Image (cartoon, rainbow, N blue to C red):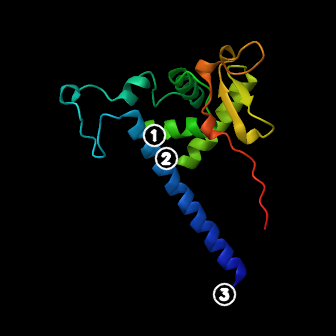
Amino acid sequence: MDKNTTLADLERLKQSFLEKAALVDQTIMLFKSSPQSDINGNSFLEEEEHSPSPINVKYSSFKSRYSYKQKIATILTAENRFLSVKEITDIIILLQPQLKLDEVKKAVGSAKSYMLKEKAIVKYVVGASNANSFYGSKNWLDESGHPMPEHMYDEALVNTKENIEI
């Protein structure tokens, strides 16, 4: 067996797992945003059976025809807190599941860069790593440039550097 072939196979397998994990994350996010429904979407609350789902209410101003800059602004406004690019991308995929994840990642990255240049949003980096970048409104920062508690990013998403020894 050729080492390069094995490595390429492992890389493809890894990518497949990562794509499936992203879909699982999206499903989890959907269920968290709609706690009154079971896995089949059946309502636990009979009187609310015909009311809009919480995700539809939360993102009611989101339109699929919007530019990615408008989509990012709508999502940040609805969430009212600093978000990572991954969170923004996951929400767009949740709202528009027909889109391809890779295409959305590229479009969000590009739109985010333009919004930063235009000063429509600000970037807040936790620690020294750009992997811990969160985006939001400059109005969500206190005088010292840190996010106000009511607009705080999800601390569970902060990547910590780990030292690996073999």
Q: Which mark is residue 29?
A: 1
Q: Earlier in the sequence, mark 3 or mark 1?
A: 3
* Category of crowding for the residue at label 1, using alpha-carbon neighbours closer than 10 angstroms: few (below 14), some (14–19), many (at least 20): some
Q: Earlier in the sequence, mark 2 or mark 3?
A: 3
Q: Are marks 2 and 3 in contact (CB under 8 Å)?
A: no
Residue 85, position as x, y percentages in the image:
63, 37
Q: Nearer the viewer, residue 150 or 62?
A: 150
In front of the other: 10 or 28: 28
- Name the residue at the left extreme: 46
Per the image, the residue denoted by label 3 is: 1
Choose mark 3 or mark 1, whichever is in front: 1
Helix, strand or loop at disc 2?
helix
The answer to whether residue 46 of the structure is visible from this angle is: yes
Nearer the observer: mark 2 or 3; the answer is 2
Residue farthest to the right, as pictured: 128
Q: What is the secondary structure assignment of the residue under circle 1?
A: helix
Residue 43 position within the rendered picture, expressed as x and y whole percent measured from the top left:
24, 35
User: Would residue 159 appear left or right of 88 to someone viewing this image?
Assistant: right
Residue labelled with disc 2: 25
Cβ atoms at labels 1 and 2 below 8 Å apart: yes
Q: In terms of image quadrants, where is residue 54? A: top left
Neighbours of disc 3 within 10 Å: few (<14), some (14-19), many (20+): few
| Label 3: which secondary element | loop
Quadrant location of the C terminus in the rendered image = bottom right
Residue at position x 22%, y 30% from top? Answer: 45
Left or right placement of residue 166 versus residue 9 in this view: right
Q: Is residue 7 above or below residue 91?
A: below
Residue 111 is situated, as x and y percent measured from the top left of the image, at 65, 32
Q: In the rendered structure, which amino acid carries the disc numbered 3?
A: Met
